[in-house]
Image (cartoon, grey):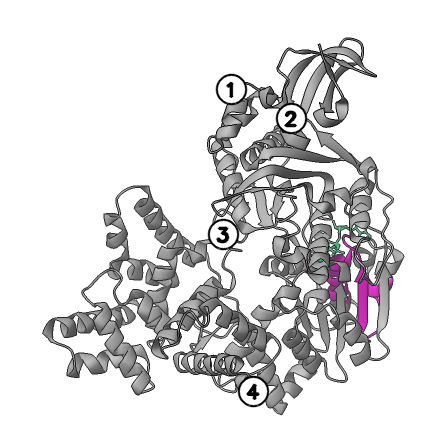
Amino acid sequence: MDVTPILDSLNDAQRQAVTSPAEPTLVIAGAGSGKTRVLVHRAAWLIDVEGVSPQGLLAVTFTNKAAAEMRHRIEALLNLPVQHLWIGTFHGLAHRMLRRHWREANLPQNFQIIDSDDQIRLIKRLFKNLEVDDSQFAPKEIQWFINAEKDEGRRPQHIDDGGDPNLRQKISLYASYEEVCQRGGLVDFAELLLRAHELLRDNAELLGHYRRRFKHLLVDEFQDTNAIQYAWLRLLAGADGVPFVVGDDDQSIYRWRGARVEHIHQFQRDFPGTRVVKLEQNYRSTATILNAANAVIANNASRLGKNLWTDGAEGEAIRVYSAYNERDESDFVIGRLRDWIDHGNLRADSAILYRSNAQSRVLEEGLINAGIPYRVYGGLRFFERMEIKDALAYLRLIANRDDDSSFERIVNKPTRGIGARTIDMMRSYARANACSLWRAAGAIASDDLNGRAANAVNAFMSLIERMARETDGLELQDKVDHVIHLSGLVDFFKKDKGEKGETRIENLGELVSAAKSFTPDPAEEMSPLDEFLSHAALEAGEGQADAWEDCVQLMTMHSAKGLEFPLVFICGMEDGLFPHQRSIADPNGLEEERRLCYVGITRAKEMLYITHAEQRRLHGMDNFSQPSRFIAEIPVEHIEEVRPRVQVTRPMHTSYSPRRKSAAASPGSEMGVRLGQRVRHKKFGDGVILNCEGQGAHARVEVNFETAGTKWLVLSYANLDLM
Ligand code: ATP
Ligand code: MG
């Protein structure tokens, strides 16, 4: 057997990891050292050399995109398709198990996944039904509470209220929430994991089956597993399983969502005799970028500590640009992107990273104006758009009449004369009789409602029944097409004159295309419609339209984990934004932000730009901030400050700042200097002011010195004599 392709492109430490005997293994190493590569090659090694059937492998990745990539790479190494390999995120794999064993998991066969928005809506409804006062709890707070408890593996009966009435009420809301979900066959994201864990824990036979089947468990980004994911993994591994996990403590960035980096230590306790492999050579970034990242992360106290080096090129200095405001920042980024593209580079090889989703809007506007195609990971995604959710709600109701959130979403959309009072009556009936809204609607339409209201409800119900009948047996895309028309959604948005309505109709059309190009997974055992709906809920954002197009990648630093790009921009490096305001005072929070910064910097292969703005409008508020402390943690020798190119035109975008406007009218006037003014510098001699920028301590001038040439000087340090 020729193992060359599997081992050839690995260094010694990587090879050692890939070929380890069947015993628990922990690969712990810094960014870009080849952890993911090792995982891919390990899978290929097991299949090709150890003779493990692809069905006997379970591989966990952090995103669906990474799962697709990993499958592709394994296939490329083996030169054959590996269809029955279970590879996916913890959520995706848990979902697959629940679909297969819905009975044992005590779920209806057609259970639906609800996302964060559905969850909030459900909680709000619960508040109303139970007459909970919004001023006591915010629905979001309860959502966090429920999800956090589930992430820790706790059901309401496992939580001790310790005599605290506030906590008692939260627990009781959690219990009511569970009841509603169970009745409607609804499963939220955290529930997928918890239920999959309980499924194995409580079914010895199933557990035995899966333990025999999946002897080898491969996990990427292990540092970001939460308690329930880890418990599931441990359960599945049992005494004889061979977990092989790779991770980096310095890249643990999901503590706020329940991830526990401590699992790295826990693992070694739970699996005695764990083989630990360290990888120290970085293959991704230039020495400059790597050294900058190493210097930043060295400021964290709680680390395992490791040595990461490269024998790659020194590379270019990191460019830091101090922008005037967020538009100037965006103009700068787009200018550099243009250069990059004009030099024949792929747009997809560049990424713009930011701390908060809201930052993308201004950058997006800039890219649109510049006509540069881009793609946002996260943010408002295709499957989260209103019209798409409406159409999906129809489809979901067809699949499951007891899906209350879908029912409520569309019962009167498009408007069909079912008023708030009627809906309230349905809710009370459903509550009193512990039934779904669908059943309640049927009951009150025949007994309690007056003629007009009863007709409206009956018409809605027969519409849904008719859709179900007429689409039965149709191909998935025809089903979707039929539903968007018969529901009246297309006509409804047609009435919405202008571009918005048009876009919505286009999006509905896009949903039909999405259904058309959707290929059901042969390993899933469910109807194509159910699978499509689950896919829509699970993969929101990742299957965004135009995935094939060469475009600039925009994403938060959180979603950039595991990825790499030749050119990277990190925008908004300001104290308060990054590190985030709420983490600054908390040492643990600050360390997590620093790890995020480490993740951000180490995404770059060749060139890294860091930008910050003196003034930024975000969430409708103007902020004035200092450059991020993380910039100061990068040794100066790795940095080159970028000087703005055309200074005097910069204040153009600041129409909301009258002070800036006057500065625009007469650059430099507020600094006490003017363009064209002659000045004298102690060292550089005489010169003329060409440009001015910034204000206060940041004020700078560009001076053309007669002998020393052109220089930018910070006014407060330069001690210029005006002549
Ligand atoms: P992260 O911590 O960001 O997830 P990682 O440790 O998973 O990074 P990989 O993504 O596997 O690192 O590898 C980083 C880059 O280095 C990839 O482009 C990969 O192809 C390359 N690489 C890894 N090992 C080698 C090697 N032995 N020879 C050449 N290139 C390598
Ligand atoms: Mg990786």
| Of the image marks 4 and 1, the number of the one nearer the N terminus | 4
Amino acid under disc 4: Gly
| Residue of label 4 | 163
Disc 3 marks a residue whose amino acid type is: Gln
Q: Earlier in the sequence, mark 2 or mark 4?
A: 4
The quarter of the picture where residue 435 lies is bottom left
Q: Which residues are magenta?
A: 16-45
Mark before the other along the chain sequence, 2 or 1 = 2
Residue at 48% over, 67% down: 140
Front-lying residue, 97 or 82: 97
Residue placed at 37% from the left, 71% from the top?
405
- Callout 2: CB less than 8 Å from ligand 1: no
Residue labelled with disc 1: 665
Location of the C terminus by quadrant is top right
Q: Is residue 565 left or right of residue 124?
A: right
Q: What residue did someone put label 2 on?
A: 644
Task: Say whether residue 563 is magenta.
Answer: no
Q: CA distance from mark 4 to mark 1?
A: 66 Å
Extreme residue toward the left, this view = 451
Q: Is residue 593 above or below residue 92?
A: above
Three-letter code, disc 1 = Ala
Helix, strand or loop at label 3? It is loop
Toward the viewer: 71 or 372? 372
Q: Position of residue 594 (x, y in %)?
A: 72, 54
Quadrant in which ligand 2 is drawn = bottom right
